[in-house]
Amino acid sequence: LDGSTEVDVAIMGAGFTGLWTAYHLLQRDPSLKVLVVEKEIAGFGASGRNGGWCFSGFPVLPRELIDRHGREMARQVSLAMADSVDNVGQVCEAEGIDAHYGHGGELEVARAAYDLPKLQHMYDEYAAIGLEDRVQLLDAAQTADRINIAGAVGAFWNRDGAAVQPARLVRGLARAVERHGGRIVEQTAVTDYEGGGKPVLRTARGDVRARRAIVLAGEAYLSQLRKLRRHVIPMTSHMVVTEPLSPELWAKIGWERREVLGGFGTTGGYIQHTADGRIAFGAYRARYPY
């Protein structure tokens, strides 16, 4: 940022939240002046370094949504999440983003009989909102047709899942935002903000005033702002990626559709078959830095 400025919408954070917000605002109204302010580089944080799942799962299960908000709202939330998976693929195609997008769905694999009821429960959740046509329960043989996992006794498949290379996606999205008239300033840390009738993002390089709104899309990094440090707890997650595997190994494993893969156990886990022939995996039982 080179001095104070005024725009229609000012966004803190050039990760997925901030960039998708900017992209869709500009799609709806190309005349908007949209500025994204980023402390590091676009995609520096979790958006560029994650498990590469593009998935329709929502942190509140359909039956709990039904209890809170009714069946129709629960159904619409789930459909919106599914639409988002398709939208990522559509934007990649429209904008020429080579993010290694592979829409193979999502698999949750059981390797013990006592995990099978968990798969049934997943299916029942979708059936409760009339979306059972988007999911499928697989027996051991059907699971083996998709991926060869030792001891697998069954799986749950959700069609609304895709694998991506996250760094490619976030950098490509940043370039798309700029092509559509948005502006991204990097190496500019937001130090404070004000809401209300005259919203503003404050930085050491100048103030960004917004005629319409500011968007705080810093995710875990919002904990570094004094006003939010007791509202957000940053948590860690960890990734490992293998070297490219040989064609002979892939012939034994299968996994040709590149479904994003999960399972059960003490740490949970998320796994994907990358487009360049690697396996990327991590655990999502996070650590608290405090």
Image: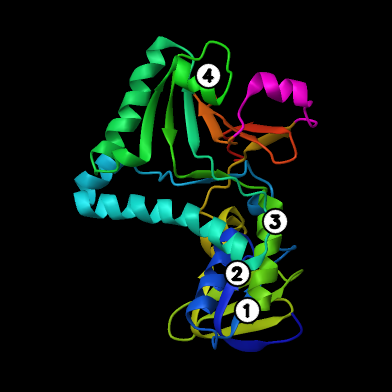
Q: CA distance from mark 1 to mark 4?
A: 45 Å
Asked if residue 225 can be seen in this view, the reply is no
Density class for disc 2 (Cα within 10 Å; few <14, some 14-19, many ≥20) is many
Density class for disc 1 (Cα within 10 Å; few <14, some 14-19, many ≥20) is some
Left or right of 50? Residue 108 is: left
Which stretch is magenta? 242-256
Residue 180 is drawn in which quadrant? bottom right
Q: CA distance from mark 3 to mark 2?
A: 25 Å
Q: Quadrant of the C terminus?
A: top right
Upstream in sequence: badge 2 or badge 1: 2
Determine if the magenta segment contains residue 101: no
Residue type pointed to by label 3: Asp
Q: CA distance from mark 4 to mark 3?
A: 30 Å
Q: Mark 1 sits on what residue?
A: 180
Upstream in sequence: badge 1 or badge 4: 4
In this rendered view, identify the residue nearer to me: 2 or 279. Answer: 279
In front of the other: label 2 or label 4? 4
Label 3 element class? loop
Q: CA distance from mark 2 to mark 4?
A: 45 Å
In front of the other: label 2 or label 1? 1
Q: Position of residue 191 (x, y in %)?
A: 65, 70
Residue type pointed to by label 4: Ala
In this rendered view, identify the residue nearer to me: 98 or 35. Answer: 98
In front of the other: label 1 or label 4? 4
Give me the disc on residue 144. Answer: 4
Q: Mark 2 sits on what residue?
A: 12
Density class for disc 4 (Cα within 10 Å; few <14, some 14-19, many ≥20) is many
Determine if the magenta segment contains residue 247: yes
Q: Is residue 7 above or below residue 229?
A: below
Give me the disc on residue 98. Answer: 3
